[in-house]
Amino acid sequence: MTALRRVRWHHPELEAAVVAGGAWLLLLAPVVGGETVSAVHDRAHASVPLLAGALAWLLMVIAMMIPTTLAAARYVGLTALWRRRRVTVVEFLAAYVAAWGAFGAIALPVAAIAPRALATSEESVLAGVLAVAAAWELTPWKWRSVRSCHRHEPLPPAGRRAHAACIASGIRYGARCMGACWPAMAAMAVAGHAQLGLMALLTVVLTAEKLALQPARLARPAAGMLVGTVLVTLAA
Amino acid sequence: MAFMRADIWTLEGNQEWHPVTEAYARAVAVMKTRPASDVTSWRFQAAIHASSGGDWRQQCQHNCWFFLSWHRAYLFWFEQIVRAAMKEVDEIDPEVREAWALPYWNYSRGGTYASLPRAFLTEQLPDGAENPLYVRERRQRINNGDALTKEAIATTEAFKAHTFTGFDGGFGGAATGKNHLDQDPAGVAGRLERTPHGSVHNGVGGPGGFMSLFETAGLDPVFWMHHANIDRLWAVWITQGFANPTDDRWLTTEFEFHDEQKQLQRSRAAGVLDTASNLGYTYEDLTVPPAAEEAAAMSRAPRPDHPPELVGATDEPLDLTGRRTSVTFGVESSRGPAAASERAGSERLYLSLDGIEGDRNPGTTYGVYLNLGDDDEPEPHYVGNVSFFGIEKSRDVRSDHPAGHGLRYVFDITDTVAALRGRDRWNPGRVEVTLAPLEEDEPVATAEAVGAPIRVGSVGLYVQ
């Protein structure tokens, strides 16, 4: 208990990591949870498709993108008043997830109509978006956005200004993160939350890119990996 | 035989244009004739510190624990290149060439020693040729032969650090990954890097001068002697029984340089710890600067293992425009593990200047003071200097080396607060922080430096 408390002293982002782990478990549940869980999952999507789709998207965002934010969440936690550490991390990450939620509100409908509008299969659309993601890895704009994600903004210590600044900072951080990761998350909007292998792969790539101190060194390996997923998708 | 790096004032005090100084000048002249693409050229060597390109250059390490080891290796390979360049100059005595080592500028002795010798101030060599040791892009006062200010050359704060790293950067800088300026959010300059390192950069360069900017600092021959002195002060600190990190992340992280044969070489901290046995050189003088003797001998309680916690900070950013500026903020009691330290009266206090950004280093070093009234003597209120060396990279996201977040400086203010408490000048519920330029700015050397403002995102108080 004491050891855990010490870890939490130094890592106020720990609970966010646990929440991301929980999101992964919820996304895994329909696959590994047996027939009953799978049936509940399918019924939810059939009866309230919009709500279920939105929740699934937010779960995907939490599972995939929260791991990329842990360094930023640690910074905002460690530089907050002790009594505001938890609420600061929660507000910052909630605003960040909300920013990705707004992205999903556009990306999900577009992904849903794309195959019909383009008169092609869902797999072809997914392969196309992954190809865009691979190409994006090789552009300078991608890496400027990734480096911008290293930017931290000191926040007011307390009061309503602290809440407002923290939420605004989370949204700005989300916007910078979108500049770096939009094609990968667009691919997930097409693929859906059942594509757990692709989710895991993209989570590892995006987290490594965001946390690396010299991220551009990952450009070619990441692009190569994404080209590989394009080929696998087309072959499937 | 180990080479001995001598104090430039020992050389020039005995003989103006000492052969070692003149050999340095003539080797610099040779390096300046080489194209910038030549790894042994003057411009390439400066670009290793920083450049606007996205290639492998601009590797210098600042605001982190690699600051000292990286610069030691940088100077070592530079010294090999300079010594090799001397072979192209017939006028240099072979004995001087064979024994030549980079001189250091021990400004820490103060007075005349804190000014540059005439060899760096005159436009011509003894034979009338252009003097490559003279650089016009310096603070005019320095090129007139004036001394650096005593605040700029102070070593007392550095020698108060008895650990290499720590929340306030310790002696050598915060534990981070590779950190050109601010890739790593944990980046904090060590005390030696803040002062005298950063303040001497500004003191010599001034607004717009070579020494004030990452990309041009290495173009001033004084840069190399300044860093030789910083390297020497690290060696002096070790002689006081203090220890380097033993962490493998510090010892084994590799950095790339070129030797005099233009071959790529890799250096790491573990390979540069002992200058005599690892690198083949020693320093003429390894005694503690007199002003820092007391600081080096002070006893220090071990720091608690819980993290420092914020107990107060400013609501608004603070803009610095070359004038004295103050800010006040409220402070509350610790609500975390530091509360026990507070109750026991054993807490350590830190002042943090966070998220510092600006387009250009104004070349002005600011002193930082606690609760300084208009009529107060500044010294009891003084906590340290901020110099903003490298700040022009703080928003640069064009390459991986800088990475786009502001500088952070942290000062251990425990002793200052204890002294202010003793004089009834400390209010535990409210703090006033003043930043004041150490010296009046001269007319600026370049238009770009005019009014270069600095924004401090937040000023905060931490307790541990």
Image (cartoon, coloured by chain):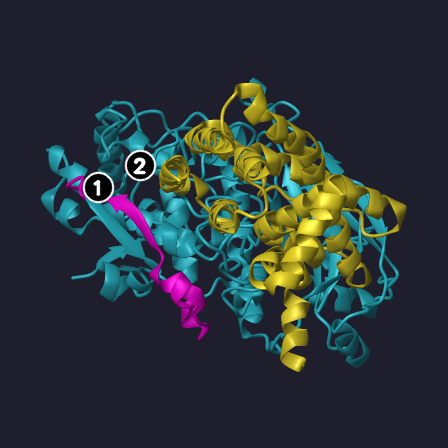
Q: Residue A86 carries which label?
A: none
Residue carrying label 2: B45
The shade of chain B is cyan
- The subunit carrying tag 2 is B
Q: In this view, does B269 lie to the left or right of B116?
A: left
Residue type indicated by callout 1: Ile
Seen from the viewer's position, the closer of residues A97 and B363 is A97
Q: Is A228 part of what is drawn in magenta? A: no
Query: What secondary structure is marked by label 2?
Result: helix
Q: Magenta span covers which residues?
A: B236-263
Examine the rendered structure and indicate whether residue B352 appears above or below residue B19. Answer: below
Q: Name the residue type under label 2.
A: Gln
Point 23% across, 24% down: residue: B33
Is residue B441 visible in the rendered image? The answer is no
User: Is residue A56 or residue A93 the one in the foreground?
Assistant: A56
Pinpoint residue B180: horizontal percent, then vertical percent.
46, 44
The chain drawn yellow is chain what?
Answer: A
Q: In the rendered structure, which disc, 2 or 1, sits on the residue that comes first in sequence?
A: 2
**Which residue corresponds to mark 1?**
B81
Is residue B70 in view? yes
Instruction: Residue A14: name its quadrant.
Output: bottom right
Q: Give B68 or B140, whichever is nearer the viewer.
A: B68
In the image, residue B144 lies at what x, y percent?
49, 31
Q: Name the residue rendered at 26%, 51% in the picture.
A: B266
Q: Mark 2 and 1 residues: CB-CB less than 8 Å, in contact?
A: yes
Looking at the picture, how far across and down is residue B117, in whole percent? 39, 40
- Please tell me how crowded label 2 is: few (under 14), some (14-19), or many (20+) other residues with Cα within 10 Å: many
